[in-house]
Amino acid sequence: MVDIETLKSKYAGEIKAAADLVALDVVRVAALGKKGEVSLQMRTLAQMSPDEKKVMGPALNGLKNELTALIEMRKLTLEEEALNAALASETLDMSLPVSTKTGTLHPVMQVMEEMAVIFADQGFSVAEGPDIEDDFHNFTALNFPPGHPARDMHDTFFLKPDANGEKMVLRTHTSPVQIRTMMNQKPPIRIIVPGRTYRCDSDHTHTPMFHQVEGLVIDKTTHMGHLKGCLMDFVSAFFETDVETRFRPHHFPFTEPSAEMDVRYERVGNEIRIGQGDNWMEILGCGMVHPNVLINCGLDPDEYQGFAFGMGVDRLAMLKYGMPDLRDMFAGDGRWLEHYGFSPLLQANSATGLS
Ligand code: PHE
């Protein structure tokens, strides 16, 4: 017969000495595992006489329970020690001065912040959606029926078809977030959507990935005058000068009527000056949300109406901050970022100026 006390002091000592969770588990297996010493002893109970069993049964069970409890306690202690060690080694000295040399805010991010600040003043909040979209949100719900020629104009990147033959797309514009918002939120709606968009196109004015800011207002009496006022105020605030604008009729499947907005500009040497001069530059598309789009989102076009707009952020950043080539923006060149980037510590805000 084994001596319970000897076993107990042996394993209690080993448990106490286990330096980490792995070592502790080795002790647990040696004592209480399937082939552990205590487990093997418990199996010998079957061969014992009834009198022996009466003594050894409770004794072995007691030993097992005691060792289990000791292991559990040691485990908690070891876990706590590991956590404290991690906390001690990961402390952050909040009083250290921040190096302003470590990085800059990309001009595209800066410009999106500026836009959010300007539109926030007009009561817009920010909404977002996924970069990988389904056909319904990117096209069908936006009144591009299957086979519609306007789909081809988007130079879409398609993903591999799924089991049902459905192809997801890299969203070709931020307009699918209009659909997601109208389907999930009751009007009045007043959102902007900054985000990445993708089209299979690359030259000195196009990159396959680019950024847009979408806008959507849905209410009961919102009309084209509100659309014009909203966007005219926006460009003057954005370029921080009075900017003359012009709205030209255009076509988008998801707005009716549709327009493009141009701003007046002049070229002086290599510099482009926005707001004055004899030339017009197109900067965004807009229009009144098409009744079919409202219906596709479960809204009654006899009750609700509103406007939407979408603009390319990258080109507006180039125009505002004088960057010559669009492709440089996404080349990831540290020197470019150091030159054109913004301090990450100065947030755009309408009280102290945008940049
Ligand atoms: N989604 C359009 C584009 O990418 C822009 C747009 C948005 C036009 C909203 C009208 C209304 O070209």
Image (cartoon, helix red, strand yellow):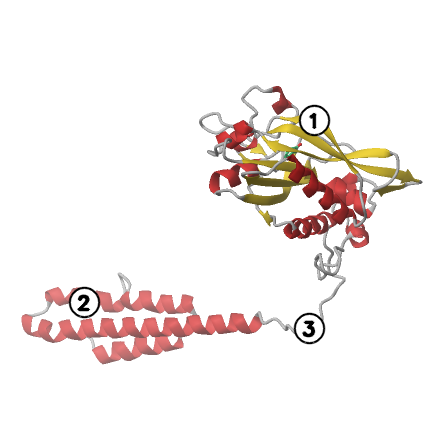
Q: Residue at x 66, y 29 (%)?
A: 258
Q: Name the residue type under label 3.
A: Leu
**SS state under label 2:** helix
Q: Reply above or below: 227 against 55.
A: above
Tell me: is circle 1 under 8 Å from ligand 1. no
Q: Name the residue type under label 1.
A: His
User: Would you name the residue on which mark 2 appears?
Assistant: 42
Q: Reply above or below: 20 against 306.
A: below
Provide residue 280's location: percent of width, then percent of height.
82, 33
Q: Residue at x 48, y 42 (%)?
A: 186
In the rendered structure, the answer to whether residue 60 lies left or right of residue 234 reads left
Spatial CA distance of label 2 from label 1 is 87 Å
Q: Residue at x 68, y 51 (%)?
A: 113
**SS state under label 1:** strand
Label 1 vs 3, first from the N-terminus? 3
- Tell me the number on the disc at residue 210: none
User: Would you name the residue on which mark 1 appears?
Assistant: 250
